[in-house]
Amino acid sequence: MLKGIYVFNPTTNFDEMFQNCVNWGINWIVTPAYIFQKESFQLCKKKYEIKICVIFAVYNQQEYLEKHPEDYCITSIGKEAKYEQRWLHFACPSSNRFIEHQKNELTDFLNKMAPDMIALDFIRFYVFWERVYPKTSILDIDDGCYCERCLDNFETYRDQPLGERTARWIKINALSEWAKWKCEIIEKMVKELTEIIHMQNSHLPIMIKTVPWLSESFGGAIRSIAGQDLEILSPDVDFICPMTYSYMTKHPSQSIHEVASEQQQISHKKIIPCIQVNKAYLDEDISKEKFDEMLQYGLQAPSAGVILFLYETFKEDLEKQEIFKQRILST
Ligand SMILES: [Zn+2]
């Protein structure tokens, strides 16, 4: 069973972190390249029997986009997709220049480093799903990409002009074509990136991060908004990791199991739901009872493990650590 935890803070005391993970029963650390490449991280890694999954943020690239703002995704309200304390900077998935840049980044990283797994994150069209709450209409979900290049490409794809070049017109009049067009773009990107990974190491496992939506949620938004079709993405990957942060999205804890179960049935791959440890975007803390409930749904079959979000908050909470240790012992 994969028992993982996210680590994003580059100033983390890595020796302490690895030791903590051993004590908690964690066997995978999931972290970006900027942490994995640190010498102090690599030195600690050699001392512990913990595997490392490196996150490759496919379309979330602040540094590149600030140099090439013309490659930003344009959202349904006509803005560049950059929000939330500056951490989210989303690219247009039709920009060939951006795609080539990302392929080169991945190749360069794998030439230098040898992680135990790669997680393709932000492998979708722009949507801030963390704040898409139950009963939201698909018309009200802010998504992308509505840049001129994407709208031109979509017109060519459907072989007829759009009645209006707006998100609303497309969602009302051409949603199934829009979904298919988006899913094919994401499929192509996954294929190209997995080819690069397998050229370097044909046995390196690959995970994809998915939005925590059922196929019918928000009128089929996992395909028409996010562009993620698990049926066509799954042949190229080994693990599916739905970001089932039910607390922040105001969904019942049971939805963690429902999403994981459906995504496993569609993909036939190992499914690893993510579990939120403490509050994010909403003010209310997550009680230990609520954490336990979410963890139990996350571990329920057909789950092949869980990834805790995230180290910094889990480290501060002794009660949740005890709950985690007990639950994974009894699974
Ligand atoms: Zn675009």
Image: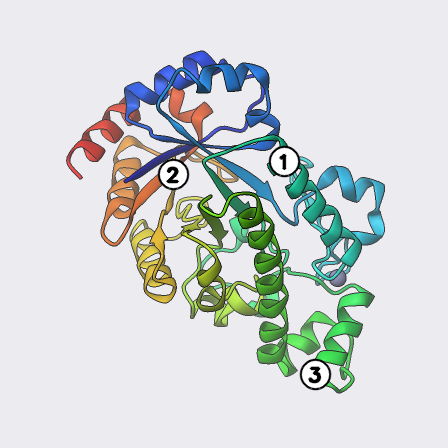
What is the three-letter code of the residue carrying label 1? Answer: Asn
Circle 2: element type: strand
| Numbered disc in front, either 2 or 1 | 1
- Taking the image in four quarters, ligand 1 sits in the one at bottom right
* Callout in the foreground (3, 1): 1
> Mark 3 to mark 1: distance in Å?
39 Å
Among numbered discs 2 and 1, the one appearing first in the sequence: 1
Rendered residue at 51%/42% (across/down): 118
Residue 227: which numbered mark, if any? none
Q: Is mark 3 within 8 Å of ligand 1?
A: no
Q: Is residue 196 visible?
A: yes
- Please provide percent x and percent y for residue 300: 23, 49
Apparent side of residue 31 relative to residue 158 in the rendered image (left or right): left
What residue sits right under mark 2 in the picture?
307
Q: Is residue 318 visible?
A: no
Q: Nearer the viewer, residue 153 or 312?
A: 153
Cα separation, mark 2 vs mark 1, equals: 27 Å
Residue matched to label 3? 158
**Figure quadrant of the C terminus:** top left
Q: Is residue 331 left or right of residue 4?
A: left
